[in-house]
Image (cartoon, helix red, strand yellow):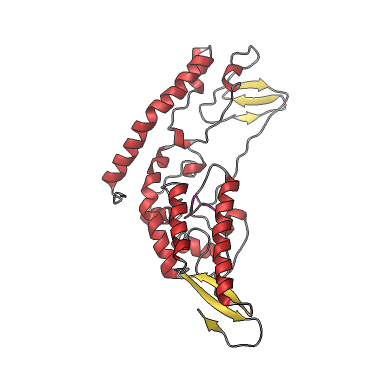
Amino acid sequence: MLDPASPESIERLVTGFHILDLPNMEGVRSRVDQFVKDPATAEKLKPWYPSWCKRPTFSDTYLPLFNEPNVHLVDTDGKGPSRATKRGLVVGDKEYPVDVVVLSTGFQLANLRAGSPASRIGVKVFGRNGYSLDDKWDTVGAATLHGYLTNGFPNLFFSGSSQATITGNNTMMLNFIAQHVTYMISEAKRRAGSDKRPIIEVTREAEEAHTAEIVRRAPYFAAIAGCTPGYFNGHGVVVTDPKEKQKAARGATWSEGTRSFLKYIGDWREAGTLEGLEITLRPTLDTPRARL
């Protein structure tokens, strides 16, 4: 049973997450002490954030590397290098001569979770009456059925985790999406028959009903706001406007996990009614248009 979202319930939820996670992160920090001999270096390498704030990495050589005499940790206090010179990099007032600089430039996150599928890949998509997919997301926030199609854009299917699920293996996630979208298309074609082609579109009512299910579960991501800046929380951007908060909540991922989401959409397919989809039959010849 989901608790109704309120300041009190969210505070209890976030506190509970931190209590559960603290022993795990204490273990991670103690592991740094175990492998790094210099206490000052070890202290600077310790992660002081919950485990959900960063992608976990795995290495048997990273921490011991700081024991090598030719390896030195330069702490920039979260600010990065001050500037570059012909000889190297300057941190604060000290110059460090270098032979090679490896740049990790990252990437730009499209409007947190509020970015449309089009904006995420840098293209423009227009639907019925010239309506832009970006304009729809900018106006009301995410609005889909199961995360893969939206009203006003017939026969447009897209992938992603907004209003859907996400897995540690993207290929697995893409397979889930392909199976679900293929079912919609194949079932619509079966109903259309061989002499007509279906135009598939989700209704406004259905996409808002699905959006409501996403918003109900969005508070489970509240703990991300307290992370150190990163792409999970828009690099530390704090959203205070209530309307923008609501739009961000609409674009959240299904927070109960992949197994829960697969049951949710699996039950929808099992019903066999294509609930929430409007299918218009376009004639392949000069025959009257019909509707299912």
Q: Is residue 142 left or right of residue 81?
A: left
Q: Is residue 232 above or below residue 283?
A: above
163 falls in the magenta region: yes
Query: Where's residue 9, x and y in %?
Result: 28, 45
Circle count:
0
Residue 221 spot, x, y in % from top left: 40, 45
User: x and y percent of residue 140 in the render?
Assistant: 44, 63
Relative to residue 173, is residue 210 drawn left or right? Answer: left
Q: Nearer the viewer, residue 149 or 268?
A: 268
The boundaries of the magenta stretch are 160-165
76 shown above or below 212: above
The verdict on residue 71 being magenta is no
Give the image quarter of residue 154: bottom right
Residue 151: x and y in percent read 50, 69
- Residue at left offset 38%, top offset 51%: 217
Residue sitting nearer the eye, 288 or 190: 190
Picture quadrant where residue 58 is located: top right
Location of residue 20 with respect to 130 vertically, above or below: above
Which residue is found at the position 49% from the left and 50% from the top? Answer: 165
* Front-lying residue, 2 or 264: 264
Q: Can residue 179 be seen in this view?
A: yes
Residue at 70 percent of width and 23 percent of height: 98
Front residue of 120/181: it is 181
Magenta stretch, main secondary structure, is loop
**Position of 226 relative to 23 (above/below):** below
